[in-house]
Image (spheres, grey):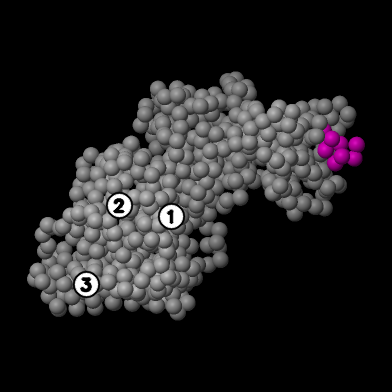
């Protein structure tokens, strides 16, 4: 077990999978010579050379499509989006090509492709560079969508994504790249896709949260513990396929649920999880499910407005108190 | 139409080759006429984009390739898939939405895929398969192979960003892809001069520093010669190329535009039909003495039988069972 940053954990996963399987290559803007815009691919060009670490011009649709075509011929591409905000330019290749070719071909071709990079709210990057992009992808049958919250998860989930035979959207968090944690050394350390984890055990209320919201929920839970409210926190880790069993299992125990989401709440992941809970465990609920989500506005630049856009710890604490009748 | 000088074929023609080219073109024609009949009878649904009039392009281009080369196309791909060697029965069953189809009926007319002949699919979003072709070329190079990729698309894909992104990447990285633009002069109902500032499409090759050439897409031997040269070079040194095959679709954009007469004149269509690639090539074979009238009759009989058999196979094939709805969404 080594202590490393989230960024280093991702780098380790890429390095180990590239050593393990010569079909794996990394392609994207500034991934090679520049060592990655966020340094996730640091040192990979030096170890693997420019045949396998490929700098591209700025053409997200083009190089994502190259990844899909290469996957059809049996390679296992890892396509980096410098930030996931740019993936909208590649949305057609991801949604109409990568996600559907297996189905449209009746299973003749499958697309073992990973599209990865940072996404979610960042620090004063304004409307186009600071948004939760998972919403655009988890609606699509044929895609898997991963949002890893810790360094160990970053490693274990990225390795599973690369070994998966399907297209995986792997959205990291710019704000978590420097977070440190213990990461298993095992080169076969894999966390299966579609498996949630209970981050904190509790008995009074279930909070579902991932990425930055997870850390805010953990802080809220600490504060509320002092008041005698015992909060259980579930991190879905994979948004599609969703581990409803673990989430619902927790709600059956606590009888109360809150879903956190950094992005705008309308038709978001919070809505989906809330619907799943009430479909599966309505009779177990002692209170209505609450969603605490980002406001339905683009991300503003001004620091004070930015703070209002994403759910604060205070908002989360207030919601938990409401749901618990305290 | 632009007045660019077009290469004329000097290729030698023997009986065996003549028979093969004519049979393939005639089969594509007959297969699609049958498909149109079946569409009218309600046995085929959705969109059905016919290739009728353009057969010389797919047949000529495929004829200079090896079976292990790849091809990928748009939604007007029945001809490319047949030329690649796919089983007509499985294609017809796919159009019928039946279990015996190439994709068990789940792709349909616009999404024919056949891994057994390296056909990388029919793709329904205009221009979207051009990056896939570049990706296939990338994989060939990565794996150290010497295959090439034929990428077919219409003039309607040229204004799309992905055309330019793919041409740039293929040229930049030297990927063995032959981009074959089948310029049939209309993107659905939009005439080429209403869509492109540069209507001589092959000239975009100059922009990307790769070989480009126009060719008479109604002349199967001319297509063979030009694409053959490009394929040889791509196989040798991974140079991509752009071929503009000037052709014409005799039918409308799809079966929902049966006459195709709103945006073009009847006179134009009739005039173009005089350049029917199958009739022209048949006449030439007779004139050159490589085929006889009897040969032509035999070919016609054979392809009629194949098309009839394809329909019979499709009719007899069962619908996909309900559980197929969820199979192949993911690979296990």
Q: Residue B95: give x, y in percent of width and height.
A: 43, 68
Give the main secondary structure of the magenta stretch.
Answer: helix
Q: Residue A119: give x, y in percent of width and height.
A: 59, 35
Residue topped by disc 3: B279
> Is A321 in the magenta?
yes
Residue topped by disc 1: B126
Residue topped by disc 2: B200
Q: Which of B155 and B177 is in front in this view?
A: B155
Disc 1 chain ID = B
Q: Earlier in the sequence, mark 1 or mark 3?
A: 1
> Is A279 in the magenta?
no
Q: Which of marks 2 and 1 is nearer the N terminus?
A: 1
Query: Residue A154: which disc?
Result: none
Badge 1 density bin: few <14, some 14–19, many ≥20, Cα 10 Å: many
- In this view of the protein, can residue A183 be seen by the observer? no
Q: Nearer the viewer, residue A104 or A277?
A: A104
On screen, residue B278 above or below B144: below
Disc 2 chain ID = B
The residue segment tinted magenta is: A317-326
Snapshot quadrant of residue B53:
bottom left
Secondary element under disc 3, as helix, strand or loop, is helix
């Amino acid at each position: 077990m080594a202590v490393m940053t989230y960024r280093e954990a991702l780098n380790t996963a890429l390095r180990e999978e590239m050593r393990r399987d010569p079909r794996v290559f990394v392609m994207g803007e500034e991934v090679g010579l520049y060592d990655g815009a966020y340094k996730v691919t640091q040192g990979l060009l030096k170890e693997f050379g420019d045949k396998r670490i490929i700098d591209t011009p700025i053409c997200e649709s083009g190089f994502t499509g190259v990844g899909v075509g290469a996957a059809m011929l049996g390679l296992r591409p890892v396509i980096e989006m410098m930030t996931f905000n740019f993936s909208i330019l590649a949305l057609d290749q991801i949604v109409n090509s990568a996600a559907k070719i297996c189905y449209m071909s009746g299973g003749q071709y499958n697309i073992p492709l990973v599209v990865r990079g940072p996404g979610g709210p960042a620090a004063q990057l304004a409307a186009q560079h600071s948004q939760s992009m998972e919403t655009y992808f988890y609606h699509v049958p044929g895609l898997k969508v991963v949002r890893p919250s810790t360094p160990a998860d970053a490693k274990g989930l990225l390795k599973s994504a690369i070994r998966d035979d399907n297209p995986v959207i792997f959205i990291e968090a710019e704000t978590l790249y420097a977070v440190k944690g213990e990461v298993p050394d095992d080169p076969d350390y894999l966390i299966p896709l579609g498996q949630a984890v209970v981050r904190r055990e509790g008995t009074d209320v279930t909070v579902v949260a991932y990425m930055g919201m997870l850390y805010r929920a953990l802080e809220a839970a600490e504060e509320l513990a002092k008041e005698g409210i015992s909060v259980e926190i579930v991190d879905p880790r994979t948004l599609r396929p969703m581990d409803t069993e673990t989430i619902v299992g927790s709600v059956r125990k606590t009888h109360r649920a809150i879903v956190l989401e950094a992005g705008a709440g309308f038709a978001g992941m919070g809505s989906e999880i809330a619907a799943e809970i009430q479909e599966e465990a309505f009779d177990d609920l002692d209170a209505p499910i609450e969603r605490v989500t980002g406001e339905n506005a683009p991300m503003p630049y001004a620091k004070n407005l930015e703070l209002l856009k994403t759910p604060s710890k205070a908002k989360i604490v207030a919601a938990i108190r409401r749901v618990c009748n305290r | 139409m632009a007045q660019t000088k077009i290469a004329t074929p000097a290729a030698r023609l023997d009986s065996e080759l003549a028979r093969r080219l004519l049979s393939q073109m005639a089969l594509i024609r007959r297969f699609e006429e049958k498909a149109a009949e079946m569409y009218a009878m309600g046995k085929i649904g959705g969109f059905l984009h016919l290739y009728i009039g353009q057969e010389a392009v797919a047949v000529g281009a495929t004829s200079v390739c090896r079976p292990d080369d790849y091809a990928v196309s748009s939604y007007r791909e029945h001809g490319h898939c047949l030329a690649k060697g796919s089983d007509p029965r499985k294609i017809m069953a796919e159009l019928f939405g039946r279990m015996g189809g190439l994709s068990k009926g789940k792709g349909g007319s616009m999404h024919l895929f056949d891994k057994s002949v390296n056909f990388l699919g029919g793709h329904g979003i205009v221009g979207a398969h051009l990056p896939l072709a570049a990706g296939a070329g990338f994989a060939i190079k990565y794996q150290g192979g010497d295959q090439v990729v034929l990428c077919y698309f219409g003039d309607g894909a040229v204004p799309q960003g992905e055309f330019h992104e793919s041409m740039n990447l293929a040229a930049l990285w030297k990927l063995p892809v032959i981009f074959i633009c089948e310029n049939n002069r209309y993107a659905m109902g939009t005439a080429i001069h209403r869509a492109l500032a540069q209507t001589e499409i092959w000239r975009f090759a100059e922009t990307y520093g790769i070989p480009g050439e126009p060719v008479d897409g109604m002349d199967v031997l001319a297509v063979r010669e030009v694409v053959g040269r490009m394929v040889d070079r791509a196989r040798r040194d991974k140079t991509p190329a752009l071929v503009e095959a000037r052709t014409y679709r005799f039918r409308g954009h799809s079966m929902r535009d049966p006459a195709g007469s709103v945006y073009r004149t009847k006179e134009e269509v009739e005039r173009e039909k005089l350049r029917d690639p199958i009739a022209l090539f048949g006449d030439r074979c007779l004139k050159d003495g490589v085929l006889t009238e009897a040969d032509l009759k035999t070919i016609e009989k054979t392809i009629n039988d194949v098309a009839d058999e394809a329909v019979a196979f499709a009719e007899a094939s069962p619908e996909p069972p309900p559980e197929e709805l969820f199979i192949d969404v993911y690979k296990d």
